[in-house]
Image (cartoon, rainbow, N blue to C red):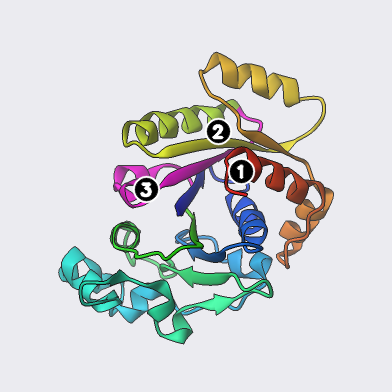
Amino acid sequence: MKIMVCGKGGTGKSSLTVLVARALSKDHKVYVIDSDESNTLLPNILDAEPPKAIVEYLGGKGTIFEKGEVNITKALAKAGEGIRLDELPSEYSSSSPEGIRLLTIGKVREFGEGCACPFNFLLRTLLKNLNLINGEVVLVDTDAGIEHLGRGVEEGCDAVLAVADPTAESLELAKILEEHVVKMGKSFWLVVNKVTPDIGDIINRKAKEMGLEVLGTLRFDEKMFKSCLEGVRLEAEEGYKDVETILKRASLM
């Protein structure tokens, strides 16, 4: 299954991706694809070394549109078999202590190097042509906002896990995502992060007014907050328990 984790900046997409990956890794082979061209801390909180970017394997950002989808697929796949992530050269993935494999699409790091459009195109091509075997799960930690929606990246996924924080803005963005994802026939799940006891009811009421169904909430977890602040391996107590509950509701555990 291929799941994109989406939402407004700062909602906790990377943290949720890591917790979901850890929970699913008990029974599945899990790959995490870092497609956020700005944030570099996912390897830290996953506790894995930063791998070489897949865009480098294909000759760099400037070559992506020149190659096109067909040639990218040929470069990454065995003939007629689709793309297998475990067949990429070893330097283009790394592993967490739980055995979760981390891959990175690419990063914007130089002044004037241009937009992230090639990364979205590469991710879309990769997801559309991935050949997964039984027991494999791919989680995509996306960039902030919904630019990936405009680039059609969701076409290659099976489901979207939208993350909102306790703000009207993030719920509005989740509603836009839901409308488009459901039209495509994909599964859509909404999770609200950083929830404190005094605002849980407000969030559920606001979401209901907007026609949104909240699959579950993650309580504010002090351990998560501190490890994210320090940029080290993600630690969580309440948050991890909440993720397990959410995954069971989505029939993923």
User: Residue 217 placed where, x, y %?
Assistant: 69, 35
Q: Secondary structure at mark 2?
A: helix
Q: Earlier in the sequence, mark 2 or mark 3?
A: 3
Answer above or below: position of 172 versus 153: above
Answer above or below: position of 151 versus 176: below
Measure the alpha-carbon separation of dots 2 and 3.
16 Å
Outermost front residue: 134
In magenta, the rendered stretch is 144-167
Q: Mark 2 highlights which residue?
A: 170
Tell me what residue is drawn at x 67 percent, y 57 percent: 23
Q: Mark 3 highlights which residue?
A: 148
Decide if residue 137 is on the left or right side of residue 197.
left
Tell me what residue is drawn at x 46 percent, y 43 percent: 160
Disc 3 marks which amino acid? His
Residue 79 falls in image quadrant: bottom left
- Residues at circles 2 and 1 in contact by the CB criterion of under 8 Å: yes
Disc 1 marks which amino acid? Thr
Q: Secondary structure at mark 1?
A: loop
Q: Observer-nearest residue: 188 or 135?
A: 135
Tell me what residue is drawn at x 47 percent, y 28 percent: 175
Task: Say whether residue 204 is visible.
Answer: yes
